[in-house]
Amino acid sequence: MVNKPNVQSQQQTSQSLISIAELRAGLNGQVIAPDDPGYDEARSVFYGAHNNRCPGVIVQPANADDVARVVLLARESGAELAVRSGGHSLAGHSTTEGGILLDLSSLKGLEIDVEARTAWAEAGLTAGEYTVATGKHGRATGFGDTPSVGIGGLTLGGGVGFLVRKYGLTIDSLLAAELVTADGQLRRVDAHTHPDLFWAIRGGGGNFGVVTRFQFRLYEVDTIVGGMLILPATPDVITAFIAAADAAPDELSTIANMMVAPPMPFLPEEHQGKLIVMALMAYTGKTSSGDQVFAPFRALGPLVDMVKPMPYPEIYKLMEIEEGPPQEVACSLFLNHIDRGVAETLVEHLRASTASLVVAQLRVLGGAMARVPAEATAFAHRDRRFMAVIGAVYEDPSETPEHEAWLNAYVAALHQGKSGVYVNFLGDEGEMRIREAYPRATWDRLTEIKTRYDPTNLFRLNQNIPPVSR
Ligand SMILES: Cc1cc2nc3c(=O)[nH]c(=O)nc-3n(C[C@H](O)[C@H](O)[C@H](O)COP(=O)(O)OP(=O)(O)OC[C@H]3O[C@@H](n4cnc5c(N)ncnc54)[C@H](O)[C@@H]3O)c2cc1C
């Protein structure tokens, strides 16, 4: 149960730092104060555990000028600034207690140039909104697996999804961006203009400014063969599934979720409560080759086969979740190999959990993502073959220590020597884990750019790369 904010103390906080009336007068967009109708809705984020925070004021900008004014106001007043696109930050970075929440969900403009195969997309769009709109032209840019995730946070961290092996990370399709830096300047960045900033925002998150819009490359992705395949999660099936996904052409990207099957209308009752592999798969090659590409997976004896030709945006219908779990522990890591021993470990630890829902997710990487040089972008883990996310969902916060112990043991058993993590799959895990997201040379370059563009660390509610103090 989330309490209504203490309006008086919030007003004092905002009044001491910012005048709401002046803010309203100076902006074209919406300014929502704690006692305004719609405040509770506007402050909500995807993960309920972070909804106890109450911003002093929420600004929904009408345009980039509004964004620049808010950035300058935060800088001058010293108020904490939270920047939100889709609100899916695992660490709760897109909300603040008493500070300014800059909620970009009001910026939904999308200009599609079908001929040039590019799109300018404002940062408040979700992956689903963008994909449905470009899908009408038989075009797509790859984002993640969930339609409600914002293109803002996802792109700035890297972006791993259904097109990763064919077209790389989301940042590999990024041609340019416009962002407001800490000095309030709106800058266009691309390979030729501020190339340092353009490098940094491709993996370095929101550390360098507020991106108001992105220009993406669009690919011809119309009808795909894809959907969901459910298999029994035995060590043999897991090993064979991953081997087949790894050997498949780049046109196939897969996300395999190992979990205890919850009740699902399309899963026969006898399989509910059993360990399953719920695989989401997208093949962007010729529809006529689909049968051949999926044959090794179908040979594993699926319990449910919902793989079929479909317009690309339909793949997102499988993951339409608008609200996150009440409590969750999760951890992500890269793996170099997934053999039968690893598959046994995966199954054994899933069975050991007492949480209401446990998932071990495996993504097979490689393909176009691996062909980009590691130093080309701030996301540098180009050579990692598999990405795993382990998570447990539960209701009662008092159970957290028990689930954390389970998670730590699981991750220790899976660990394969080399550290590293995808920054967008980090929760609030501390400085050492943020360092793991970046190899030393990448970190040093990011720090140098951060020091130049944001020396006071105005943009700090993120997986923070602190500036060097002079
Ligand atoms: C259910 C779920 C599924 C996911 N699936 C995938 C997946 O398949 N692939 C994948 O790569 N990731 C995935 N993610 C991770 C996701 O990419 C990150 O959580 C991402 O940060 C969310 O972006 P957002 O805009 O929704 O979040 P927000 O909470 O709005 O923002 C996240 C961070 O980015 C900053 N930020 C956001 N927009 C801007 C901007 N315009 N300018 C500057 N800073 C900004 C925020 O300040 C915050 O620090 C998933 C997350 C969830 C919760």
Image: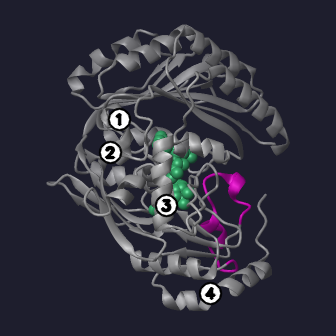
Instruction: Give the labeled residue for mark 4.
Output: 20
Q: Position of residue 49 (x, y in %)?
A: 71, 52
Disc on res. 450: 3
The region drawn magenta spans 34-53
User: How much space separates mark 4 and mark 2, taking CA atoms?
Assistant: 40 Å
Identity of the residue drawn at 51% across and 42% down? 440
The residue under label 1 is which amino acid type?
Answer: Met
Image depth: mark 2 or mark 3 in front: 3
- Sequence-wise, the earlier of marks 4 and 2 is 4
- Sequence-wise, the earlier of marks 2 and 3 is 2
The 10 Å Cα crowd at callout 4, few under 14, some 14 to 19, many 20 or more, is: some
Image depth: mark 1 or mark 4 in front: 1
Image depth: mark 4 or mark 3 in front: 3
Image depth: mark 1 or mark 3 in front: 3
The residue under label 2 is which amino acid type?
Answer: Asp
- Give SS at disc 4: helix
Judge by depth and name the residue closer to the eye, 96 or 226.
Answer: 96
